[in-house]
């Protein structure tokens, strides 16, 4: 099944993309277009649809929030087909310069991203809605970048938000760094939160505040129990955390709630 749905967000076009062999997609991702600028390019499983909508909108510039395949999947194809220039954080440039290994579940759900030459962000990113500023927001990945348009009150947080409460984490996420990134974007004035998976039309700042509160509480509780001598598994049970067993098995353990416990302890120990 190929899934494509179009939304309008205060002058920004949003495209919800998903793919599966049969039935509804397990996961979906958004890319956004304002004027000739595209933010993220979606999964390569939708390589027929994304270049068509980019051509229809006369996309000339692309900015990537990070290198993950559900965000960069069509960047190389769009650059080749449309001559679009692709921009990213220095670490995104490094990641996208060569092929990378991904797990079977990532290949199935998203498809692979072809390597390409990504350029550094320009000093100014002019858009139809005003000047857009990149904000480095690591945690979900080291290269993760959000984009802020002050005049329009819009934040494109990539995967920084996702939800008020998170049920599972990638093995390479750093919750401590993500907390710092959430604090950083709360210094900005926005209300429209155009997340790459679950956009929020209203109360964008409140949604970021809610996730920050959730992660702070989780981080503090994990550290407190670790100081009392509890192991990872004991902390997990004491906090009554739950695993989504299907996601855990489908993703070969690369995505799980236990990863959140491990991430907190890893970050805290490194800070000592």
Image (cartoon, rainbow, N blue to C red):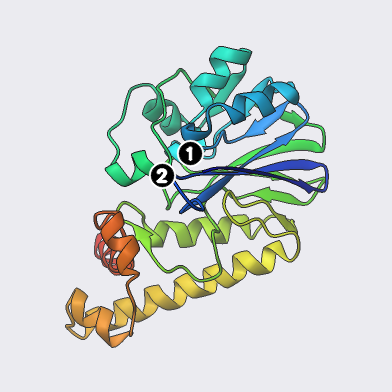
Q: Is residue 154 in sight in this rendering?
A: yes
- Give the side of residue 7 with respect to residue 265, left or right: right
Could you say where residue 101 lies in the image, as x and y percent from the top left? 27, 34
Q: Quadrant of residue 58?
A: top right
Nearest the eye: 156 or 2: 2
Separation of residues labelled 2 and 1 (CA atoms): 18 Å
Q: Residue at x 69, y 60 (%)?
A: 200
Q: Locate residue 103 relative to residue 83 in the image: left or right.
A: left
* Residue 124 shows up from this direction: no
Q: Is residue 6 above or below residue 47?
A: below
Residue at image mark 2: 109
Which is in the foreground here, disc 2 or disc 1? 2
| 100 in relation to 55, above or below | below
Q: What numbered label is drawn on residue 135? A: none
Q: Is residue 187 above or below residue 138?
A: below
Residue, x 25% and y 58% (percent of image)?
253
The percent position of residue 120, horizontal first and vertical second, equals 53, 24
Q: Residues within 10 Å of mark 2 (few under 14, many from 20)?
A: many
Do the residues under discs 2 and 1 have CB atoms within 8 angstroms? no
Q: Secondary structure at mark 2?
A: helix
Tell me what residue is drawn at x 47 percent, y 34 percent: 45
- The quarter holding residue 39 reads top right
Q: Quick one: SS at disc 1? A: loop
Q: Position of residue 65 (x, y in %)?
A: 54, 39
Q: Which residue is mark 1?
A: 66
Which residue is most to the front?
22
Residue at 31% across, 51% down: 172
Please tell me which residue lies in front, 180 or 213: 213
Q: Disc 2 or 1, which lies upstream in sequence? A: 1
| Quarter placement of the C terminus | bottom left
Q: Where is residue 77? Give x, y as percent.
A: 52, 20
């Amino acid at each position: 099944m190929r899934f494509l749905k179009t939304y309008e967000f205060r002058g920004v076009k949003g495209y919800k993309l998903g793919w599966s062999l049969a039935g509804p997609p397990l996961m979906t991702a958004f890319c956004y277009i304002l004027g000739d600028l595209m933010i993220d390019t979606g999964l390569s499983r939708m390589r027929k649809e994304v270049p068509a909508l980019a051509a229809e909108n006369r996309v000339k510039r692309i900015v990537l929030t990070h290198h993950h395949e559900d965000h960069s999947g069509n960047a190389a194809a769009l650059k080749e087909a449309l001559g679009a220039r692709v921009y990213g954080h220095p670490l995104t440039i490094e990641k996208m310069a060569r092929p990378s290994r991904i797990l079977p579940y990532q290949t199935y759900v998203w498809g692979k991203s072809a390597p390409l030459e990504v350029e550094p962000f320009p000093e100014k990113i002019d858009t139809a809605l005003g000047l857009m500023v990149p904000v480095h927001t690591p945690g979900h990945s080291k290269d993760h970048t959000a984009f802020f348009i002050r005049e329009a009150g819009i934040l494109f947080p990539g995967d920084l938000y996702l939800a008020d409460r998170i049920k599972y984490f990638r093995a390479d996420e750093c919750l401590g760094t993500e907390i710092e990134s959430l604090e950083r974007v709360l210094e900005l004035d926005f209300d429209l939160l155009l997340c790459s998976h679950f956009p929020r039309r209203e109360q964008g700042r409140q949604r970021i505040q809610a996730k920050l509160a959730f992660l702070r509480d989780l981080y503090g509780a994990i550290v407190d129990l670790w100081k009392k001598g509890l192991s990872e598994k004991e902390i997990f049970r004491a906090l009554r955390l739950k695993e989504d067993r299907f996601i855990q098995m489908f993703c070969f353990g690369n995505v799980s709630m236990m990863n959140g416990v491990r991430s907190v302890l890893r970050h805290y120990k490194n800070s000592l």
